[in-house]
Image: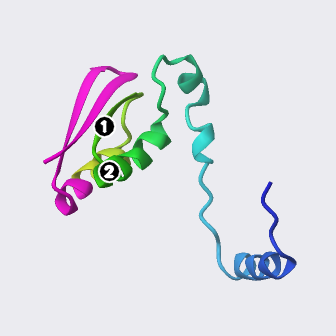
């Protein structure tokens, strides 16, 4: 459980009333039924977050659903800043292997 102090809530409400806030669906709800029914252990949103972590470490491999455009862009950006190779192998729409190899 996350506890948000009253002062922070008041500031957030004040900001919210001054300008519109872009609301997106929470990442966990994206294609929820597809994620539950898939055989891939890594969801779409987690795949995006794993890329920089594996690049900072010793690399790794994971299987996921189809990669979002954000994840593909993230892979390109990570390769610009780290000496890694990110290989994306698509076996099907909801079956993608991602290999992060440190060079």
Q: Is 19 above or below relative to 102?
A: below
Q: Outermost residue toward the right?
A: 6
Q: Nearer the viewer, residue 35 or 49?
A: 49
Numbered mark located on residue 60 in the image: 1
- Report whether 76 appears left or right of 21: left
| Picture quadrant of residue 85 | top left
In the image, what residue occupies the spot 38% across and 30% down?
66
Q: Quadrant of the N terminus?
A: bottom right
In the image, what residue occupies the spot 70% across and 81% down?
15
- Magenta: predominant secondary structure element? strand
In the image, what residue occupies the spot 31% across and 55% down?
56
Instruction: Report crowding for label 2: few under 14, some 14 to 19, many 20 or more residues within 10 A (C-alpha).
Output: few
Q: Nearer the viewer, residue 86 or 25?
A: 86
For disc 2, the marked residue is: 57
What x and y, as percent, mark residue 96? Answer: 33, 26
Helix, strand or loop at disc 2? loop
| Picture quadrant of residue 21 | bottom right
Q: What residue span does the magenta drawing correspond to?
A: 77-103
| Picture quadrant of residue 22 | bottom right
Q: Nearer the viewer, residue 32 or 77?
A: 77
Q: Is 14 above or below relative to 3?
A: below
What x and y, as percent, mark residue 32? Answer: 60, 30
Mark 2 and 1 residues: CB-CB less than 8 Å, in contact?
Answer: yes
């Amino acid at each position: 459980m996350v506890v948000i102090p009253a002062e922070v809530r008041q500031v957030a409400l004040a900001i919210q009333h001054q300008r519109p806030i872009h609301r997106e669906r929470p990442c966990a709800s994206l294609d929820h039924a597809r994620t539950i029914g898939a055989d891939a252990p890594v969801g779409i949103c987690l795949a995006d977050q794993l890329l920089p972590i594996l690049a900072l470490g010793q690399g790794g491999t994971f299987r996921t659903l189809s990669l979002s455009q954000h994840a593909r862009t993230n892979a390109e950006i990570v390769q610009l800043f780290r000496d890694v190779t990110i290989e994306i192998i698509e076996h099907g729409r909801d079956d993608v292997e991602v290999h992060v190899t440190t060079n």
